[in-house]
Amino acid sequence: MAGTCFHCLEPIPSGFSGEVLYQNEPQSVCCIGCQAVAETILSQGMSDYYKFRTTSAGKVDELVPEQLSFIRSYDNEDVQQDFVTHQGELSEVLLSVEGISCAACAWLIEKQLLALGGVTRVDVNTSTHRAMIIWDTKQILLSDIIKSLMQIGYKAYPFQADDEAAQKQAVAKAYIRRLGVAGLMTMQVMMFAFAMYFGMFSGMEEDFEQYFRWISLVLASPVILYSALPFLTNAIKGLKAKQLNMDLPVSLAIFGAYGASCYATVMAVGEVYFESICMFTFLLLLGKYLEFRARLKASEFTANLQKLLPLTARKISHVGEEHIVAAKNLKLADKILIKPGETIPADGIVFEGSTSVDESMMTGEHLPVNKHIGQQVFAGTVNHDGVISVEINKIGQNTLLNQIIRLQHSALSKRPKLVEITDKVAQWFVACLLVFASLTAIGWYSISPEQAFWVTISVLVATCPCALSLAIPTALTCAVATLTKKGVLIKEAHVLETLTKLTRVAFDKTGTLTEGRFSINHTVLINDSYSEQEALALAASLERYSEHPIAAAFAEHLTQHHQLTNVAVHPGVGISAQHGNDTIAIGKSTWFGGTKSQAQATLFINEHAIADFHLDDKVRDNAEAVINALQSNNLTCHLLTGDSSRAGAQLAERLALNSYQSSCSPQDKLKAVESWSKQGAVVAMVGDGVNDSPVFNSAHLSIAMETGADISKNVADVVLLKSNLSAILDLHKVALQTRRIIKQNLAISLLYNASILPLAAFGLVPPWIAVIGMSTSSIIVIGNSLRLLKL
């Protein structure tokens, strides 16, 4: 066969006819090795490797192990588009990491990666087994970061729902295999143990009894050396990192008992307890498996979000023809057709047709949202009843769906102070446990040497602080997942903790307590040199450069486009521009020293007032109910608005707010919040505009409406995805319940450890009971946290 190999680009030897399928076309390869590697690369969804490579791949023997080849492909910029975001010169990626079992694992990973040049930040979430990493691509490659994790025993790969689901399935199967081996061998060993316990071998020669001991050793070895091996490897990882993790006392118990029993068998002295350590391992694995399933349920929501994205899309060519293409290959400005019932594959603007869209996956609101020409649609939402054509304006990590997932992971990865404290307490607890176990062994050895070993094992196992280390992370993971389903996006780790301490809530008016959908009620001309139509046209030309909700009221009056230059936005005041030789501006009536009026906006030309515009804005339907509910929870509610008209006072009176301040500049809002803070108040600020971003930085908690300006959403700690004020009540309710759950979890774990420790030390807790107790306490804590998913 003539030609060159598709994979390594070397000549194809005569007599070989291997092929791989690439972009629905057969491609020839030179050997079975290249065929296997190429098929693996293509099946892993990394076909872009062949599209963008600049040199030959090399023969297969240069790529062994294959895993390293896949890792290097993650450095390709086009491949990274699906899972890497950029922040200036820095890049950010979310990795799924196999092998994380406790807080010490997170510490080890963070220490290992932060020691690399170019890695600026690492946040590891032990509940979801994911790590968020920020690094400088000029100093280090992503493949080097992943290889560094492999060097310390952790396999990592970019978070993708399908890949992670497969990995979770593999972990579940591994648990089942280890449980199967442990269960089967435990039953066999127990048969011999029961026989010896009940004296069935009495009267037999000692050689026969020794023979059955050897059989028990052979049967128990797979349980210890295979089923229980993960406990030992995790303990060794912790010791290498100079950390005492939860697996250390368990490993000491299992392998210590196994070693002692092996010695007794080989030397034909003392007693053997192979059946006890086999049962111990089986029960421990069973508890770990149930814990794994519970953690999986807590973290599955974000993976489910990723699965909402379709695999294919209907791309419209420049001649209007429709082609089915892979959704991940869509580019900016591509035009796609979406039919009824189909899922939208990327964010874009509707340029033809109209429909209604189900956005419940983002907002929690199941009522369909009408979409017309010029409106934005989002990836993962479902088209209901119309046929629409969309021009793509966001792809990959920039889509709203991926932003939600990334921000949720960011909030979960950042560790609240309380979590750091409990992690340190757990480590010190393990250290104290080892000391206490040593003292127990010494004490029992002087009293009853034959019982000392097993009492010590019971102490090591029963008091392992696994439940304590799970008490807070599992509750936070479930709380964030619940809020995301309700359309509340948590961006910072301190949010849930701060919410429980709130004393005041301050609201912006326009777009927050009101809908922000203004209409012009009437216009008052101050200067007769201009007609009402001319004043409205000038105002509309200027307002099209503003993101303030008031600007939308002038859109219908944009009858002619005036040429404007030097457009400048003045937060909290208005917007100005140059129109020919004149300086025009629109904003507060008191701008340029003008007389205060009840108008929401005033037009100025060369600093002289020309016209006042009086606008109407509808109060949100649920605003009054939300204010009443917050006040019933002993929170005072306040209004900080830049509106200089009487609308602020009227709204404050209508909603029975505790206080209001009108004509507020961004600095005035900032001073008000800082003043309350100095008085000892814990303040939340709810807003949506550009002028709210400064006060967001000074408030203890900042909440932005999804319909607000981008800068306010970027600065805010929380974003309400459906711009519904009732979501604030959901947020407060979940925060209070999360605090209760965390307190219950801590109480359960501390009460268990405090009560079981003296019982185990006095020899009242057999090893198998100790295993059940430790596993049960962890499962109870996780189960208690899962209640948050039902809110």
Image: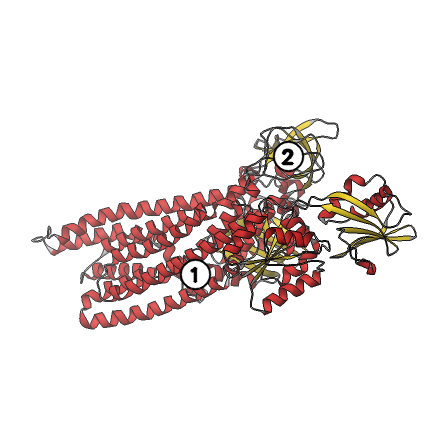
From this viewpoint, is residue 330 visible? yes
Q: Amino acid at mark 2?
A: Asn
Quadrant housing residue 262: bottom left
The residue wearing badge 1 is 237
The structure residue drawn at horizontal position 64% and vertical position 51%, both measured from the top left corner, is 651
Secondary structure, mark 1, is helix
The structure residue drawn at horizontal position 19% and vertical position 54%, both measured from the top left corner, is 213
Q: Is residue 384 above or below residue 573?
A: above
Question: How is the protein colored in the picture?
Answer: secondary structure
Can you give x and y, in whole percent of width and height, for residue 707 in the image?
Answer: 65, 46
Disc 1, disc 2: CB below 8 Å? Answer: no
Q: Is residue 479 above or below residue 531?
A: below
Residues 394 and 627: in front is 627
Quadrant housing residue 28: top right
Q: Amino acid at mark 1?
A: Lys
Residues 737 and 269: in front is 737
Can you give x and y, in whole percent of width and height, for residue 635 in the image?
Answer: 53, 58
Can you give x and y, in whole percent of width and height, for residue 525 in the image?
Answer: 85, 47
The structure residue drawn at horizontal position 31% and vertical position 65%, both measured from the top left corner, is 754
Secondary structure, mark 2, is strand
- Mark 2 packing: few (<14 Cα in 10 Å), some, or many (20+)? few
What is the quadrant of the N terminus in the image?
A: top right
Q: Does residue 305 appear left or right of residue 559 in this picture?
A: left
The residue wearing badge 2 is 370
Q: Does residue 282 appear left or right of residue 41 in this picture?
A: left
